[in-house]
Structures are given as C-alpha cells and as structure tokens.
Image: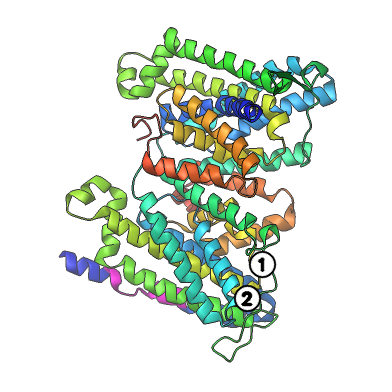
Amino acid sequence: MSAAQSIAADRRWRPWELVLLAALVISWFAAGNEHSLLGNEIAIFALFALSLDLILGYAGIISLGHAAFFGVGAYTAALFAKHVMPDPLVGLVVGTAAAALLGALSSVLVMRGSDLARLMITLGVAAILYELANKLEFTGGADGLQGVSMGLLLGRFEFDLYGRTAFAYSLVLLVICLLIARRIVASPFGWSLRAIRDNRLRAAAIGLNVDLRLGAVYTLAAAMAGTAGALLAQTTGFASLDVLDFHRSADVMLMLIIGGTGWLWGGVLGAIGFKLMHSVLSAWTPQYWTFWLGLFLVVLVMVGRDRFFKSWTWWK
Amino acid sequence: MLTLLFDGIAYGMLLFVLAVGLAVTLGLMNFVNLAHGAFAMAGGYVTVLLMDRAGVPFLATLPLAFLLPALVGAVAERLLYRPMYKRPHLDHVLFSIGLVFMTVAAVDWLVGSQQQIVKLPLWLQGRFEIASVGIGKYRLFIIVVCLLLTLMLQWVLGRTRFGSRLRAAVDDPRVAAGLGINVNQVFSVTFAVGSGLAGLGGALGAEVLGLDPSFPLKFMIYFLIVVSVGGTTTITGPLLAALLLGIADVMGKYYVPQLGAFVVYLLMVVILFWRPQGLFGRGATR
C-alpha cells in the first residue's frame, strides 16, 4: 500500500464513527428540558478536551496550562457581549480569534526546551493570565463578569432557561470542530505531527519544519479551546476566575486520559466519563471527592490505561 | 528597603530548603514530581499538631518534622514512585497530580480546612534593629537554620563518598551503575532526605507561608520554578534561583501589590524561554 493510499484509508468514515456522530445528534432529543444544561456542559468540555488532544495526543506537547486559552475565549466573549454587541456568533468568532492570537504568540514559547520547561511555561502563561484577570478592573477581579446577556442566536432562537438552545448550539459547534479536527488529523500534516511526537529529531531529519508545524497545531488547539471557553461564557452568562484556574487544566487533561489520547473521540468519551464520575463522587462525598479522583488517577497510571479499561486482562 | 531584602532572603532560603529535594528527583531520575509539596505540608502539620495537641515545644518538633516526611518519602519512593521512573513524562504528571489531590482531600478530612497557626516561642517573636534595618527574629532564625542546612548539604555532596556517588549517578546513571554504584539505593536515600528537608522547610515556613490543606497546590509552581530556573545539575543553581524568586516575590508584592505574583510568573516564562535548561543548568533535564 502506498503512502497516498494509507492516508486515504484513514480518511474514510467507519461505521462506528457514524454511529457516534448520530448518537451526538440524538442526545439533544433525548436530553429534554431536564438534562440539557448538563449536556451543554459536557459538550463544551468535550470540545475543550478535543483541543487538548490535538496538541497532547497528536503532537506530544504536555501542557498544564491549556485553561489559558479556554479562559481567554470565555473572557473575550463575555466582554464582547457586554460592551460591543450581544450577538452570540460574532462573539464566538471574536473569542476564538483572541485565543488563537494568544496561541500563536505563546506557541513560540513551547517550541524549544525539554518537557519540564514546556510544562512550566504553559503553567506560567496560564498563571499570568489568572493574575491579570484577578487584578484588572475590566475583568471584574475575583467576582468575575456577571450578568452577560446574550442576543438571539441567528436572530431567532432565544437562550432559554432549560438550556435547550444552548445545548444545540454547543453540540453543533462540537460536531463542526470534530469534523475539522478529523480532516486535519487524517491529512499529511496530521501524520507529520505524529512523526514529530514520536521522534522529533528524525522528523526534522526527513525535512519537516518541526517548529512551524508545532506552532500551527498549537494555534489551532488554542483556537478550539477558545471556542469552548466562549461557548461556556455565552451559555452560562458569566465568566469567572475559575475558567483560568489550574484545576481546569488538570481536569481537561484527566478527561482526555480517561477517554484516551491520540484519537479524536477520546475527548468526547472522556468528558462524559469525567462528568459522570464527578456527579457520582460528589453526590457521595461532596467535600472529599477529589481524594477519590486522585486515587483513580494514581491507579489508572500505575496499572496503565489500556489495561485498566480492559477488565478481562486484570488477572492474567 | 534593606528590611525587604532581608525578608526576601529568608523567603528564598526557605524555598530552597523546600525545593532542593525536588531538584534531586528531577536531576537524578528525570521524574517530574508535582507532589513534592505534599511532603512539605506533612512536615508543617507534624509541627503544628504536635505543638497544639501534645504541647511539644517548637524546636523539639523540628527533628520530627524532618523524620516523618523522610520516612513517608522512603516508603512512597519504594512502593509508588519506583515503578514510574521509566514511564513517559505525561504519566509522571498525572500520577503526581493524583497524589496531590489525594493528600489535599485527606488532610482536609483529617485536620480540617482551616488555616493552621504556629505559636512561636517568645524568644523568636518580635524584631530588633541593626543600623536602622528592622530584622525579624524569626526570619533571622530561618536564615541561620537554612544556611546551616545548605552548608551541610554542600559538604555532603562535595566531600563525602555518598556525595560523589550521588553526583556520579546524576551525571550518568548507566555508567555509574556500571561502576558498581547501587543507583537505586542512592536514589532511595536521596529521595527520603529530600522529602525530609521539604518537611523541615514546611515546618519552618508554616508561619511565613501559611499552612492549610491546599498548600501543595499553592506552592507547587514555586518549587517547580526554583528547580526549572535553577537547573538540576548543581546545588548552587537552585539556591540562587530560590533567592532570586524570594526577593523578587517579596519586593514585587511590596512595590507593585496590584500585580501580585504576576512579576514572578513573567520572569519565569522569560527566563525559561531564554534558557530552557535553567539559568545555571547544563542540560541534565533532557
């Protein structure tokens, strides 16, 4: 099989992928008024995790500060709706663009250095933004930006109390981003990212411009994270410091690990798994649920992810 | 001005003692341990609880604040950390974040989430003036203790047989093992001592840094800054980085309080961009 053929084979839709896509659509009808808010949240986190997957799963950049882009998207969308115009779609584009800009600027920082230096730099960028949002006047400091009222979606649909519109809105964007990410990952560019992840030196030796490609995917992932953040701000009507907090970055990484890195549905499945685990654990021990979350992580890593989810291999 | 400098130095020395164990973990086994702060917190709680509930005097609690975390560190290294060394960095990060989450929730459950207060003995309270420079007695105490610890560390590393084994193992574990050095054992001991030092630092710093269950998360980034900026090949690197960080933090909070920790993070990002191996490193973090 030639290279062109194998790339084309990866692009073809498999039946289970179509089933999963259909399941996403059906989930909107199944959710009803009761669960739409939860569904909306899951869709947003799925998108956020998907964006992290692009850099972590495909390009191999460990980021502990991915919340930076999520937060920038959220704050930009909220500020835009408050001061410029309340149209959701324009706000979404602006939020995405702001995050992409930040991603492009900070991608220079992650191109060089060891894993540790990159870890620290991503962590540092998120921490800087957290401090800025905390201290600046127009971001509302520790109170956050409240009372962001959105206009009608497409000039027709109002954001209702049950989150029906919000869920549909987030779901559509999730599907669009999934399709975009799928196209990119299956392209020669996507394959070159995997080559860089597996062996940077050899990838450079066969003539790939490693820095440029890493920069491109980092910017793209930042833009998607920004979209997710903007969606959160628009559908919940506020942006607070919480969106930039360290635990956001840790949570999204956890989601991706639960769902599996290096395939696009990992983020979606992980977001669902994480949210389920969160609601079960926090209903059980509201104050100490992080303990069980931590234990889960430790066991997951010690046993190995593949083995952990294949229960039939446990006693072999 | 000079008082601030003095406070900054005390803060920096404290950070150094807290983070030096991490430098070894990272330099020797290339293990990114985000849970280092948990050992520091353990030390802090040993001191606070012993003083509060058992009425042990402050100074007498300090050796225990060293020993207990060291013991926990030795056990944890053998049981939990060792299988992790060969794994990719992502696993290290996830694993140690998991540990942090667990300790934060566990301490919250055991002791409660309130801020713990250390009642210093009378002779360490208050401040005096030398040439119109106000000097806090406790700050001076911290500097003296940390300075002694640093000198001791330097002596152990530079002059003893164990120190030369450790340095050999840091430089190249494979060759060191080939020369008959039991690298695993060297690392166990070092990990335990590093955890103990973190515990001692946590106990000393409980008054200055504050102590509550979120301690490991709050100071995680500071320890990592010390190590990544200072590099992991020498002991002077982290020391200078810690002093720089301590002084910058104290000065920054005093002169531009509206920016808070912003200055520190910005400095770190710039330094790491300029020199990814740290200011004084020479490429041991791989």
The region drawn magenta spans A10-21
Q: Position of residue A30 (x, y in %)?
A: 60, 80
Q: Dominant secondary structure of the magenta stretch?
A: helix
Q: Position of residue B229 (x, y in %)?
A: 45, 35
Which quadrant of the structure image shows residue A214? bottom left
- Report if residue A157 lies within the magenta region: no
Disc 1 target residue: A145
Q: Residue furthest front?
A: B131
B11 or A37: nearer the viewer: B11
Q: Position of residue A165 (x, y in %)?
A: 61, 83
Q: Which chain is mark 2 on? A: A
Disc 2 target residue: A82
Is the residue under label 2 in contact with that under label 1 (CB below 8 Å)? yes
Marks 1 and 2 sit apart, C-alpha to C-alpha, by 9 Å
Residue A301 in view, yes or no:
no
The residue that appears at 45% across and 70% down in the rendered structure is A97
Q: Secondary structure at mark 2?
A: helix
Residue A181 vs residue B49: left or right? Answer: left
Q: Residues within 10 Å of mark 2 (few under 14, many from 20)?
A: some
A141 or B111: nearer the viewer: A141
